[in-house]
Amino acid sequence: SRREMWWAAEQVAMGVISVVLGAVVLSCEAVRVCLVVVQSGLVATRREAMAAPCKGHRSRRILVDGECTVCNAFRTFVSYRVRKADAIEWASAQEASRGASESGAVAEALRATYAAPEAIATNLLAKLHAVTDDGQVVVGADVVLGALAECQAPYPQLAALGRCCPRRLADGAYDVFSRNRHAWFGRGGPAWIVGKAGVEVDEAARLKHAVAEATWFVAAAFAGLTVAVLPLGDGHKDGPTQYATRLVCASLMLLALWRDRLDRKKPEYPRDFYERFVGPASPQSLAIMRVVCAGILLVFTLPFMTAPLPETAAVPRHMCKPTGALRLAGRLAPSLFGAEALLASATRLAALALATRVLLCLVALGLLTPVVAPLAAASWLVYGGVLRSYNSWRGHSFIAAWWTLVVLAWRGGAAEVWSLDALRARRGSSSPAYRGWTRFMVTLVFANNYFMAGLSKFCASGVAWAFGTNLKAKLLQTSLTQGSFGVYLSLALKHLPAVPAWLFLGVAGLYGELAMGLVPFHPVAKLAFPALMWGMHLGIILLQHIVFVDLLTMIPAWYAWHAVDTLAPKDAKRYAGG
């Protein structure tokens, strides 16, 4: 029948209107959160200057259907985006209809607009109504546009654009949406009825809401890049798409940290960060860190692990390409660290190698640690920079141990027990809380080593890195190019199906490294994931013939220093984190 045809057409129109509204709001929100985040984080200007008010009706008190899901969502939406807290007041249409016979500006304005009392109740629940400062009653689409005009940019501009639309088109779209809102989106029930106080949202809550939205937007962009864009690329680590993904990833982490900082300002924020994630540490645990990291870095300097440093002086100079700190040092002091000075002199390189080993031995013994530890960290950095200049040492191996030494050199307190310094002289010891923060920083370094490795893979190929065909190709390639130890397990397993065998290994490797980012903050993660990574390194030895000596040693040591803190007496309770 004709009525059914009109109903079907109206449902189609409702669907189109909903999709268009969703797309417009999503686009405006992307612009808004960018403006709020940039302004709040970088520009010290007043929030009221984000957008100029739009001319037209100023919605002062808006009456919403308290049982309507859409109306209450609109109320919450505007409350978190309005520029001035007193620009809009909210009231329940149900309460306004019951009090229409009473005195008051709102009741008088409604009686002046609708002569019959029953017409007031009917119209208030059918459409949005607003009463302006001068007693004018605004209905329907004009209420929505007036509310948007009071919000942050770009909503005032959107409201101005909406006022330029033909009146019949705007009112017709509003009427279609209003008639079908309950059928499409449901009712909230009596508990949703708005009280006289409305919604109390302060500036801090608005900023936190904007940062949370920005986090979700950036997370969605990162997911889209890693799931839909990067897997279709060339798989290279460097390129415009890869750089864009890294930028988005960095933005996501910064926004997450900002959001956590805003959360900590709340009075009801849970226990202090120290109690939740750090906890006290004993001097024995820091002593284990000192000995282990010095021993790992000392192993790096041995001839069977890396190329003998003096021998690199005989390599042709065109192959020497210093990078990072060594390149900077060469530019600042070319007579000491230049490619034609330190890197070309076998005598100087031999002296550097000897000094690095001696300093690391002194760190392990705990002799003059406050002086020796910084010197050992600096000397090892130059040592590694020389090898990196010839591309003979790449990747992230041994970096976690060096950063651990840097943290211990900066914070101190690693030679209070089990050291020659402790035997030589009794000095004041640091507090358990201070040592706890040192241990937590080392844990961040340890977990970040894996987390960043996983992110580098994720930002290069996205989820495609874990695909069975990709991992199978990588393992077979390294099996043929690395020392074999007489075992070619990857070649023996080459006939296994890509799914599920190789896919399982890829997923475990990629997402296991990413999950290590939870280790400093989650009790289950800190208990299970380091052990899983140790098992992964054993698999890498068998399948790729690559031995991560530093991480195979550091993971058991990580458990050891936490076990020491767990069993330590009064000054260090069972560790809460770190």
Image (tube, rainbow, N blue to C red):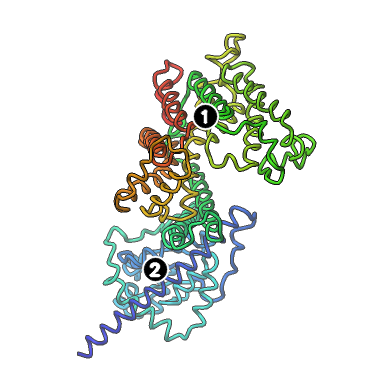
Lateral position of residue 51 relative to residue 218, left or right: right
Q: Is residue 204 above or below residue 486?
A: below
Residue 357, given in percent of the width and then of the height, sits at 62, 23
Residue 42, given in percent of the width and then of the height, sits at 62, 54
Q: Residues within 10 Å of mark 1 (few under 14, many from 20)?
A: many
The N terminus: image quadrant: bottom left
Residue 412, given in percent of the width and then of the height, sits at 59, 23
Front residue of 1 and 114: 1
Which residue extends farthest left?
1
Front residue of 518 and 512: 512
Q: Is residue 137 above or below residue 290?
A: below
Q: Is residue 493 visible?
A: yes
Q: Tell me the quarter of the picture where residue 487 sits.
A: top left
Q: Tell me the quarter of the picture where residue 244 sits.
A: bottom right
The kind of secondary structure element at disc 2 is: strand
Q: Tell me the quarter of the picture where residue 305 sits.
A: top right
User: Circle 2 sits on which residue?
Assistant: 63
Q: Report the residue at 36% width, 75% height from top.
A: 127
User: Circle 1 sits on which residue?
Assistant: 437
Number of labels in the image equals: 2
Question: Mark 2 is on which residue type?
Answer: Leu
Front residue of 562 and 272: 562
Distance of label 2 from label 1 (alpha carbons): 53 Å
Q: Is residue 22 above or below residue 431?
A: below
